[in-house]
Image (spheres, rainbow, N blue to C red):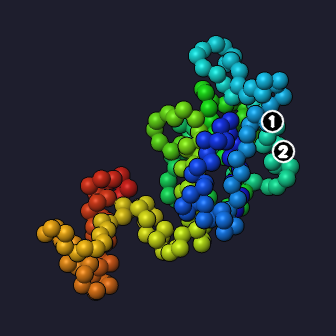
């Protein structure tokens, strides 16, 4: 898989990909992540990538020209399955979406900034718009990192125990059950006996019931 992230702040994105699961996936050759500086595609002397909004109003708007130049240059080298724009009014990221994107080959993620991008970019270059929540960030870089993390960890081989990802919250529209580790008794606070029983079927039933209980209490919308 290849993920090309278009950003005006590439240095902000380096750290998430230099550690832990994402770094191991990159080192193994399972995914290639490229941080592309949008300013490199600006034709302005000052390398600006934004301008005032037509019609007035507060805030700047990301210009179509450098974005089009960048996306067209990338597309000239390979086909892309999705060109994603990070935006507060995009489709809310969920596990099903991440599962699907983890099967793709080439993805572009355009990080939003300022008051957003020229609408013509969204109309003619973007194939999918994604939000990571009902709030506004200073820029789309953190959202791009979240989206990338949710995808990369699902690529076979990225996690040493691949069954771990399959039992995460939301994979079956349920929240994950409680988990415990040693010691079994900490100052009188004990682990549920069923988990110490060694009875696989009983343990699986307990986990399923706890998942249902937790989902009903915390996210009943997932059960509709």
Q: Position of residue 32 (x, y in %)?
A: 70, 59
In this rendering, is residue 16 above or below 161?
A: above
In this rendering, is residue 117 above or below 2?
A: above
Q: Position of residue 187 (x, y in %)?
A: 15, 68
Q: Residue beneath label 1, please?
A: 41
Considering depth in this image, is 200 or 142 the residue closer to the camera?
142
Quarter of the image with the N terminus in it: bottom right
Q: Quadrant of residue 150?
A: bottom right
Q: Position of residue 220 (x, y in %)?
A: 32, 54
Residue in the picture at 54% in, 69% down: 159
> Which badge, 1 or 2, is on the more N-terminal residue?
1
Residue in the picture at 58% in, 16% down: 58
Residue contact at pointers 1 and 2, CB within 8 angstroms: yes
Q: In the rendered image, is residue 44 in sight?
A: yes
Residue in the picture at 23% in, 75% down: 184
In this rendering, is residue 122 above or below 132?
A: above
* Element carrying mark 2: helix
Q: In the rendered image, is residue 83 in sight?
A: no
Considering depth in this image, is 52 or 209 the residue closer to the camera?
52
């Amino acid at each position: 898989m290849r993920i090309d992230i278009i950003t005006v702040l590439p240095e902000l994105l380096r750290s998430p990909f230099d550690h832990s699961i994402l770094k191991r996936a990159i080192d193994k050759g399972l995914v290639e992540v490229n941080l592309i500086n949008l300013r490199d595609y600006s034709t302005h002397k000052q390398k600006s990538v934004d301008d005032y909004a037509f019609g007035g109003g507060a805030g700047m708007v990301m210009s179509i020209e450098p974005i089009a130049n960048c996306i067209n240059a990338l597309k000239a080298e390979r086909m892309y399955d999705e060109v994603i724009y990070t935006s507060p009014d995009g489709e809310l990221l969920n596990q099903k979406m991440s599962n699907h994107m983890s099967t793709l080959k080439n993805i572009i993620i355009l990080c939003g900034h300022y008051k957003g991008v020229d609408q013509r970019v969204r109309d003619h270059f973007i194939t999918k718009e994604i939000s990571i929540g009902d709030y506004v960030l200073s820029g789309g870089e953190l959202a791009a990192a979240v989206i990338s993390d949710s995808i990369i960890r699902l690529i076979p081989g990225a996690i040493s125990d691949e069954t771990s990802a399959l039992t995460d919250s939301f994979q079956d529209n349920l929240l994950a059950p409680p988990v415990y580790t040693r010691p079994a008794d900490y100052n009188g606070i004990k682990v549920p006996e069923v988990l110490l029983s060694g009875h696989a079927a009983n343990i699986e039933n307990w986990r399923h019931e706890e998942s249902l209980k937790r989902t009903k209490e915390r996210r009943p919308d997932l059960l509709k």
